[in-house]
Amino acid sequence: NNPARAVKAAVETAAEKVTDVLTPEVPGAPGSAPPSIEEPTTPRDPLPPKKEQGAPETRTPTGAETGAPATANGQQGAYLTTAQGARLRDTDHSLKAGPRGPILLQDHHFREKITHFDHERIPERVVHARGAGAHGVFTAYGTAERVTRAGFLKKGKETPVFVRFSTVLGSRGSADTVRDTRGFATKFYTDEGTFDLVGNNMPVFFIQDAIKFPDIIHAAKPHPDREIPQAQSAHDTFWDFVSLHTEAQHHTIWNMSDRGIPRSYRTMEGFGVHTFRMLNEAGETALVKFHWKPKLGVHSLTWEEAQLLNGIDPDFHRRDLYDAIEAGAYPEWELGIQVFPDTPEETFAGIDLLDPTKIVPEELAPVQAIGKLVLNRTPTNFFAEVEQVAFHLGHLPPGIDVTNDPLFQGRLFSYLDTQLTRLAGPNFHQIPINRPHAPVNDMLRDGFHQDAVHAGVAPYRPNSLDGGNPFPAGDAEHAFVDVPVTVSEAPKVRANPASFDDHYSQARLFWLSMSPVEKEHIIRAYTFELAKCYRQEIRERQLRALADIDPVLCAEVATGLGLPAPQPSGPLADVAPSPALSQVGREWPADGRTVGIVVDPDADLADVAEVRLAVFGAGMVPLLIAPHGGTVRGTEVQRTFATARSVEFDALLLAGAPAPAPDALPARDAKAGATGDRTVDPRVLLLVEEAWRHAKAIGGWGPGVAVLERTGVAGTPGVVTGDSGSEVLDAVQRLMAAHRVWDRFPASVA
Ligand code: HDD
């Protein structure tokens, strides 16, 4: 006797009847004609959802089922209809006064179709517009139970999540591999309300007070007159701002380091940046910082790779994320926390925990793992999920609370506010991707895009008309508790604590923690970016800031710019390096890495099939590169010489020395030279040269060895030759564990 269920059943029965009448033979079903590549002319069953992929949430915000089938996607039904459900005869011709006449205003289908199209775009995010997202699950280890009462952190608890990665500066269509900070925002759909951890791949921020956010973003975005450069910090206004506003120097050196050009979203660390306050069952509090640690390690592109990719594959990170998930190489991170005592000073080891331009080195406060994140599902619809997901730092579950970090406090205002414009109103929490998985029982009503049909007459408290519902929850029912921290009795001021004045010690700490090759990359990045500025005084001012970070860094960049190196303005900070900040010197699993295998279709390919299987067996992706598409001796070719470029591969194997195809670049023919009585395709030589320059592992056997000799790389570090493919692959795999062959990079500094 539930009326909603009765209606749903009636609708389902009716739908079945209609389907009986309408559904003809399903193309491709046993006994029917083979599928045709022509446009279908008869209706068919809906396409099934992608593997392991459910349709968007069909519940209403109050938790009721809408009755819509899980695959209710408009274009998958049998007949084309208007938005009101009227079937249409024709959607290809507007209604005209005769075949050569004007369109009639009465064409309601035309107007509905074009009007909707005209309004398909919503404003892109004012920052972090370019992004990619994926679904997954978070499993708690239980190790955080002593510091927080948050239910999703209790041992073994599994919580669905949605993660969106992003760049900061570029617009929605900009390239993935630009030098920039990356966003790492996670929505935990916990049983006690949604928790949004809106972090970055860098643990510090440019500014200490949220009121400066429009300033840093206006400076970093394209110039307002010409709207260039897109998605870059290599321009005058950015360097003008950071050289004047020196609290930005710490974040800036992170951007100039290899962290600014990640190899993949899967190989990025994530940081909550701010210090949070946690509250446990006993009512005790602790201060914590959140860290995401990628299972595959922290790895970056080289600058040249990043630049090439901007043109060759601007979607590189997005593609990498989705390809990895769809191949079953699910990206994984551990969530960890650094825990600090909640003292009135809110400092640890002399570091102000409310200053978002400071880290606490892991050597002083180890990161303790509290759970694991696995991303295992790509979005069904990019707009509905990745574009419409709305994060907000105020989405907190019981047991996790804010601190007085002035950047955190300001963000608590900004994220809610921005959705009002971007998602056009206050009901964005009803959009499927933003719906909490905890039961919602609010008294928010009406407004633009109200999707809920709220029952009851008393959306207010106290009431007697709706039985007094809903009631506030007590401590025992796990209500959110605002930790009753003492608020300062100091006068109102527009000021920072004195500890915020130290802008250089941690930038220096970062620099001193880098290996020689990472230092070299930082020097080159500063030199490149400052050389792109038009104004000499901006370069000079930034050199003065570099002198206060480190004289060697300053001198090297000054040499590159052809300018004198200024002296530091005072004594340099005496800081101990934090080895945990370096990306070099450890070994990591190579899961999901890509191995290019160049084959010569005319040569003996006996080893190639075995090597491919071994690459798969190691959890990596082999891509066969041949002069033409199709198959080579029964094995499918994934890349041709025309489509392959070294930047896509983490390692390169040469099983053959293919002769130039007719479409090879003529200008390089001369350089190709002869292999015995043959010439090697110049595009293969380019692959080898680039892979070598980008310090990738390279291997060759059989005729492949001759190609390595020809390019002059044979015998150099990280170039392996051998008698068989499997022997070479073994050695290449060992090299890949270190991500790159670091010895190949020159390093001018110690
Ligand atoms: Fe922010 C988006 C991360 C400071 C204002 N921010 C946004 C996103 C990330 C961050 C990852 C993209 C979320 C998504 O994928 O939808 N932001 C940070 C971090 C910060 C930070 C780690 C410093 C620690 N942000 C910050 C400040 C302000 C903002 C100080 C404003 C005072 N951020 C925004 C925003 C955005 C945003 C304008 C744009 C779209 C959105 O919020 O939903 O409100």
Image (cartoon, rainbow, N blue to C red):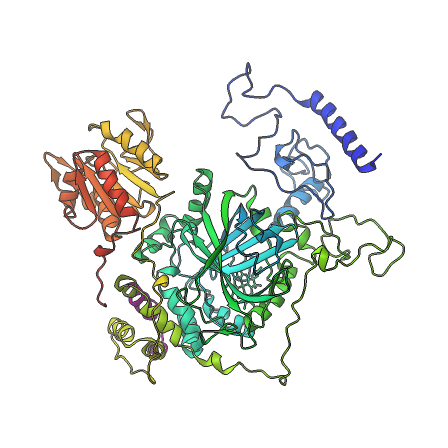
| Residue at image point 46% right, 47% down | 332
When the figure is inspected, residue 249 is found, relative to residue 73, above or below; the finding is: below
| Residue at image point 40% right, 52% down | 267
Would you say residue 661 is visible in this rendering?
no
| Residue at image point 62% right, 48% down | 433
In the rendered structure, the answer to whether residue 604 lies left or right of residue 99 reads left
Task: Specify the farthest residue to the front.
Answer: 282
Would you say residue 403 is visible in this rendering?
yes
When the figure is inspected, residue 596 is found, relative to residue 180, above or below; the finding is: above
In the rendered structure, the answer to whether residue 488 lies left or right of residue 722 reads right
Quarter of the picture containing the N terminus is: top right
Q: Of residues 165 and 601, which is closer to you in this image?
A: 165
Q: Position of residue 529 (x, y in %)?
A: 34, 67
Quarter of the picture containing the C terminus is: bottom left
Q: Main secondary structure of the magenta part?
A: helix
Task: Specify the farthest residue to the top.
Answer: 31
Q: Of residues 380 and 535, which is closer to you in this image?
A: 380
**Residue 607 figure quarter:** top left
Q: Position of residue 10 (x, y in %)?
A: 79, 30
Q: Position of residue 475 (x, y in %)?
A: 71, 60
Q: Position of residue 443 (x, y in %)?
A: 78, 57
When the figure is inspected, residue 700 is found, relative to residue 455, above or below; the finding is: above
* Magenta stretch holds residue 290: no
Task: Specify the farthest residue to the right.
Answer: 465
